[in-house]
Amino acid sequence: MSVQDALARQRTLNRETADAWDLFASHRAEVTRLVGGAASGLRLGVLGAGNGNDLDLEQLVPRCPEVTLVDIDVDALNRMVARQTPEVRSVLRTRAPVDLCCLETIVNASAELDPLALAGPIARAIGVADFDVVASTCVLSQLIDQVRQRLELDPSRCLAAIQRLRRGHLALMLRLLRPGGRGLLVSDLVSSDTAPELLTGVSHWPEVMVKLVAAQNFFTGLNPFIIESSLKQDPMLAPLVGRVALHSPWVWRISAARAYLVFAVTFQRKS
């Protein structure tokens, strides 16, 4: 998969979900709650904003007088901004197209690549720093999918590239945050395609998540416990990180036949 192919695929996915506001309702409520669980007067950056279905901006604007939306898909961001109220539009800033994957660099880099160095060009493309909150809204799985499609015939190389991408994405979030700022990584973990229990209405999702991870039934590179551990122990990332919290997962039901288990990790950049 080339960069152009990845962009075309993302545009297609965004067009398919452009009118899916209602399907995102329960998921959006959880993400909005986690973003809004902080003081007012916040500068918010959203990575992978896309169609804007993951966040209720009307609820957030009273707390966030400046919101920067970042995505590779200019058309999706324009559609999203156009449907907002004048009050919401007045605080929105868009940064697009911004390639959050840097596929060629990820695929061809050595294992020793400094994740902060990888994040540098992306941060410069965004052109804004010192956010109070940076939210990555289910974009990491999409970025990983680009790598997987490119390297699926070379599993060991694919896994190493996905791990580089994951470290680089966390580093980008840290680089964009002001000292004391808060990062929120939200990601889908697994779908009901391989975990049909997500369609049953079971309520003990933390226990289900533990069992799925133990059974290696999750999207490659998105083990929430590894992400939590990386933020606490990675020699390049951990010195920049204060408190880390892995939140209870939730089910995002997108149709009668399909659902995702979604998790969130919050962390603070050290002052």
Image (cartoon, rainbow, N blue to C red):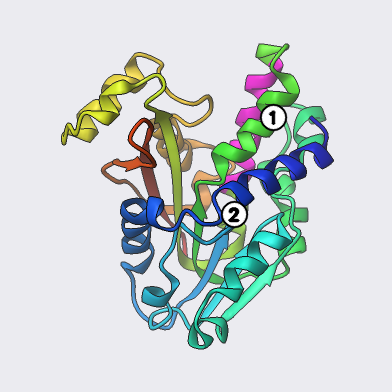
Q: Secondary structure at mark 1?
A: helix
Q: Is residue 30 left or right of residue 51?
A: left
Q: Residue 21's image quarter?
A: bottom left
Q: Position of residue 37 (x, y in %)?
A: 31, 67
Mark 1 = which residue? Answer: 147
Q: Secondary structure at mark 2?
A: loop
In the rendered view, tell whether residue 56 sits above or below residue 137: below
Three-letter residue code for mark 2: Gly
Q: Nearer the viewer, residue 29 or 41?
A: 29
Q: Residues within 10 Å of mark 2 (few under 14, many from 20)?
A: many
Q: Is residue 89 left or right of residue 28?
A: right
Q: Residue furthest left?
A: 203
Q: Position of residue 74 (x, y in %)?
A: 73, 62
Mark positioned earlier in the residue sequence (1 or 2): 2
The quadrant in which the N terminus is found is top right
Residue shown at the point (36%, 22%) measured from the top left: 213
Cα–Cα gap, marks 1 and 2: 16 Å
Q: Nearer the viewer, residue 237 or 169?
A: 169
Which mark, residue 267?
none
Three-letter residue code for mark 1: Val
Q: Which residues are magenta?
A: 157-170
Q: Position of residue 163 (x, y in %)?
A: 60, 29
